[in-house]
Image (cartoon, rainbow, N blue to C red):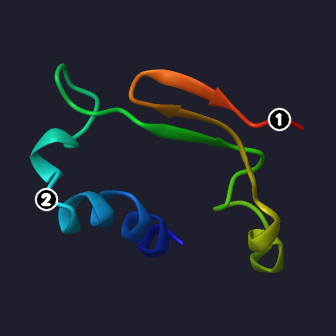
């Protein structure tokens, strides 16, 4: 699970040439994030397809999913 999430997060930043701007929660770094409805590390592997984003922060702006 950790490897898969890294591929979609830090790995994507590395592939897109953004690694220098996404090195963690530090001043000047990009801080887009997603809030999930459950912990993908704790749920049953068969439930992973059902994990959904509740909210996202993109460019400093919260974007909520309409339920």
Q: As drawn, which residue projects farthest toward the bottom?
A: 46
- Along the viewing direction, whichever of 59 and 2 lies nearer the viewer: 59
Q: Quadrant of residue 12?
A: bottom left
Quick one: quadrant of the N terminus? bottom right
Provide residue 48's location: percent of width, then percent of height.
Answer: 74, 71
Q: Residue at x 83, y 35 (%)?
A: 66
Q: Position of residue 23 (x, y in %)?
A: 19, 42
Q: Which residue reaches farthest left?
A: 20
Asked if 41 appears above or below 64 in the picture, the reply is: below
Tell me the quarter of the image containing the C terminus. Answer: top right
In the image, taking residue 51 as reference, residue 22 lies left or right, namely left
Q: Determine the CA span between mark 1 and mark 2.
A: 32 Å
Q: Compared with residue 51, is residue 4 higher up or lower down, i.e. above or below?
A: below
Of the numbered discs in the image, which one, if any, rests on residue 17?
Answer: 2
* Residue depicted at 39% across the width and 58% down the height: 9
Give the mark, 1 or 2, whose residue is nearer the N terminus: 2
Q: Which residue is mark 1?
A: 66
Count how many numbered circles sit on residues in the image: 2
- Other-residue count near label 1 (Cα within 10 Å), few / some / many at <14 / 14–19 / ≥20: few
Give the structural element (helix, strand or loop) at label 1: loop
Badge 2 density bin: few <14, some 14–19, many ≥20, Cα 10 Å:
few
Q: Position of residue 3 (x, y in %)?
A: 42, 74
Nearer to us in this view, 67 or 14: 67
User: Which residue is rendered at x = 22% and y = 43% of the image?
Assistant: 22
Q: x and y percent of residue 31 in the render?
A: 35, 32
Q: What label sits on residue 4 in the rendered view?
A: none
Residue 45 or residue 7, whichever sits in front: 7
């Amino acid at each position: 699970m950790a490897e898969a999430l890294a591929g979609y997060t830090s790995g994507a930043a590395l592939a897109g040439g953004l690694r220098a701007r996404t090195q963690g929660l530090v001043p000047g770094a990009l801080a887009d994030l997603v809030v999930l409805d459950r912990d993908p590390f704790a749920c049953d592997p068969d439930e992973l397809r059902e994990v959904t984003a509740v909210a996202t922060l993109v460019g400093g702006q919260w974007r909520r999913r309409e339920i």
